Image (cartoon, coloured by chain):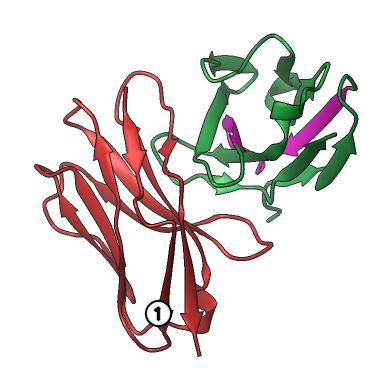
Chain colours: A red, B green
């Protein structure tokens, strides 16, 4: 069964600094997608960034980028120039590109950006 | 365009009572998911609808949980009778295509006393 592991329950970072959130996953599939979602306090979850496993190039969205290591089954999220609005729960998610389209989520990392 | 809406936002019930949670997905999204998060744990899959059909209900805990999606539009998740371990936040999400971006509602927090 596929699993997603986020080993950092909580993290904090100073405003304008860089922080990296870790995520590892386990699968025997070769084609799949990985996502990072964020849930700000009292708000709904939104997509931050996605990565297709067949793409070797790491995805980037403005201040957000990933370090995708397929062989190591690692998918970390780097937030550069952290802003107060980045304070949120961050969830890593996986979905295989065949069969049942079930998104598997990790336990989340609570990130606090400090002024 | 309206996002995914869930109702109620918070429900407090006694053990043994019944609760029905409702989700209105984004219009045109055939895929609708229900997830549950218990404090500190992962967001756990419950089931996946494609239009009105249950594509995958492998995550439903037991037969106390019943999900429906009338006419492929809104969905309801009924818990009857509720137990203490059913407490948590129930999320609904919809997607136009899978695998693709999931659009989440704000969640329905269920507290069973």
Q: Is residue B11 above or below residue A58?
A: above
Tell me if mark 1 has few (under 14), some (14-19) or many (20+) residues whose alpha carbon lies within 10 angstroms of its own. many
The spot of residue B68 in percent (x, y) is 72, 19
Left or right? Give the position of A59 relative to B40: left
Left or right? Give the position of A77 relative to A53: right
- Residue B38 on the magenta span: no
Q: Is residue B8 visible?
A: no
The spot of residue A17 in percent (x, y) is 33, 85
- The kind of secondary structure element at disc 1 is strand
Q: Nearer the viewer, residue A57 or B108?
A: B108
Q: Give the image quarter of residue B30.
A: top right
Left or right? Give the position of A51 relative to A14: left
Q: Is residue B55 above or below residue B11?
A: above
Q: Main secondary structure of the magenta part?
A: strand
Q: Nearer the viewer, residue A77 or B105?
A: A77
Q: How many marks?
A: 1
Chain on which label 1 sits: A
Q: Which residues are magenta?
A: B18-36
Q: Is residue A51 visible?
A: yes
**Residue, disc 1:** A13
Q: Is residue A102 above or below residue B92?
A: above
Quadrant where the N terminus of chain A sits is: top left
The spot of residue B1 in percent (x, y) is 68, 56
Q: Residue at x 69, y 9 (%)?
A: B63
Residue pushed farthest top? B63
Q: Residue at x 49, y 40 (%)?
A: B42
Q: Residue at x 29, y 57 (%)?
A: A22
Q: Give the image quarter of residue B46.
A: top right
């Amino acid at each position: 069964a596929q699993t997603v592991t986020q080993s950092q329950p909580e993290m904090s970072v100073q405003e304008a600094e860089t922080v990296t959130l870790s995520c590892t996953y386990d699968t025997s599939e070769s084609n799949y997608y990985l996502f990072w979602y964020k849930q700000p306090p009292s708000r709904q979850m939104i997509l931050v960034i996605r990565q297709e496993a067949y793409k070797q190039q790491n995805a980037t969205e403005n201040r957000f980028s990933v370090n995708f290591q397929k062989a190591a089954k690692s998918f970390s999220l780097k937030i550069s120039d952290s802003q107060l609005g980045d304070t949120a729960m961050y969830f890593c998610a996986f979905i295989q590109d065949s069969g049942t389209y079930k998104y598997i989520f990790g336990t989340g990392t609570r990130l606090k950006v400090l002024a | 365009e309206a996002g995914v809406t869930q109702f109620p936002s918070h429900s407090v019930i006694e053990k043994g009572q019944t609760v029905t949670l409702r989700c209105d997905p984004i219009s045109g999204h055939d895929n609708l998911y229900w997830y549950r998060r218990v404090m500190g744990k992962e967001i756990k899959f419950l089931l996946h609808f494609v239009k009105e059909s249950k594509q995958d209900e492998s995550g439903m805990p037991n037969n106390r949980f019943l999900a429906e999606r009338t006419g492929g539009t809104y969905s309801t998740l009924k818990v009857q009778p509720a137990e203490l371990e059913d407490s948590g936040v129930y999320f609904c999400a919809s997607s136009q295509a899978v695998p693709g971006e999931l659009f989440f509602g704000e969640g329905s927090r269920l507290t069973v006393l």
